[in-house]
Image (spheres, rainbow, N blue to C red):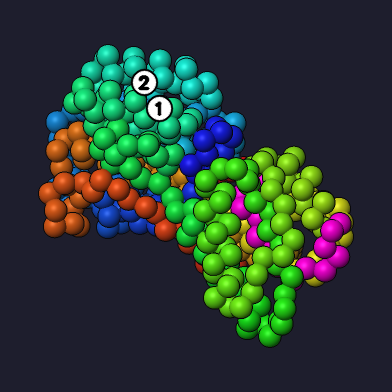
Amino acid sequence: MSDSSGLARRGFLVGALGVGAALTAACTSNAAPAAAGGGANVAAAAGDNAEPGTPVTIGFSAPAADHGWIAAIAANAQAQAGQYSDVTLEAVNPTNDITQQIAAVETLINQGVDALVILPNDGSQLTSLGRRAMDAGIPVINLDRIFDSPLAYRTWIGGDNYGMGVSAGTYIGTRLRDAGVANPVIGEIAGIDNLPLTQARSQGFSDALASFGFAVGPRQAADFTAQGGQRVAANLLQAAPQLDAVWNHDDDQGIGVLAAITQAGRSEFFMVGGAGSANAMREIQADTSVLKATVTYSPTMASSAMALARLVAQNRGMGDLVEKEVPTSITLASATITKENVDTYLPLGFES
């Protein structure tokens, strides 16, 4: 997620679990990614990139793990770095204090690391720091929350918040259309409303529903926490006695949303989640609640960022591309996970 508040992600992010894994595979291998356990996913290098190259030290900085998605970001980055005999990982203490993150990254710059992977607490406030690293000859892989200037990073990799909304809207629109539901009541439980990532998700959702002739009905914004999700879901359910479908932007938040739905005894609608947590996927697999799908914004992007940092630091390209250089921007797609394909994605899920 590109959450400037430091609360979430997720940033959310869409991207897709599957796509994130596929990207990693595209960087280094054609093999399917293997789950390393504990929400950490890695991909083995293959082809020319499987051969050890010049030993490099990669610095890593991210916010504190106060959210399931953020915790998985750190776990994935560490696990991916551990796959390479030619990579030394220098991870600084995670923090939600922007001043402390700036100081920690400055230390990495002064140490002369060969590349940096940075998930900033706030992309705008750390842009000058990214620029400083780049000016010092240290390539920066900007993860998820984008810096304000392309001069501050070598490559940006992150999810597609608009696409996340499109995936959710397309699933809901298709299901309601195929069921012959006319004038459906479609609810939306967003994240933090003033964040660009939330606005992008909502716009994608609205645009996708419009293609079916549908529109968003009752809508509440929460805060990416289970407590916030439960509170606003209770309000939405009270205001809407009849619903046909609901999209909740975030699976961590969704724990509270599902609790409110259970407490209200409501089951006349189906729900779609967001991000791709293992908790949500197990709920979908069991098929015993209103949650029937989730759209991904996967923290596997951290694994891919680490793989990209290694390639850039070693002046290598991505094996399946004609170009000799790693691209400057990579946007992950958002996959839709349902009961039919959940077994494929569950190994990539993170625990909320």
Q: Residue at x 63, y 81 (%)?
A: 177
Q: What amino acid is found at the position of numbered circle 2 in the picture?
A: Val
Q: Which residue is mark 1?
A: 126
* Quadrant into which the C terminus falls: top right
Q: What amino acid is found at the position of numbered circle 1 in the picture?
A: Leu
Q: Position of residue 85 (x, y in %)?
A: 24, 32
Q: Please tell me how crowded label 2 is: few (under 14), some (14-19), or many (20+) other residues with Cα within 10 Å.
A: many
Q: Residue at x 49, y 22 (%)?
A: 98
Is residue 96 rendered to the left or right of residue 321? right
Q: Position of residue 201 (x, y in %)?
A: 54, 55
Q: Residue at x 54, y 67 (%)?
A: 207
In this rendering, the answer to whether 71 lies above or below 264 is: above
Q: Residue at x 68, y 85 (%)?
A: 180
Asked if the magenta segment contains residue 250, the reply would be yes
In this rendering, the answer to whether 61 lies above or below 164 is: above
- Decide: marks 2, 1 in contact (CB < 8 A)? yes
Q: Secondary structure at mark 1?
A: loop
In this rendering, the answer to whether 19 lies above or below 148 is: below
Q: Position of residue 316 (x, y in %)?
A: 15, 42
Q: Nearer the viewer, residue 76 or 232?
A: 232
Front tag of 2 and 1:
1
Q: Position of residue 238 (x, y in %)?
A: 86, 57
Residues at marks 2 and 1, CA–CA distance in whole angstroms: 10 Å
Mark nearer the N terminus (2 vs 1) = 2
Asked if the magenta segment contains residue 202, the reply would be no
Magenta stretch: give its range: 238-254
Is residue 168 rendered to the left or right of residue 220? left
The circle drawn on residue 105 is 2
Is residue 121 rendered to the left or right of residue 261? left
Q: Would you say residue 155 is visible in this rendering?
A: yes
Q: Place residue 287 in its image quadrant.
A: bottom right
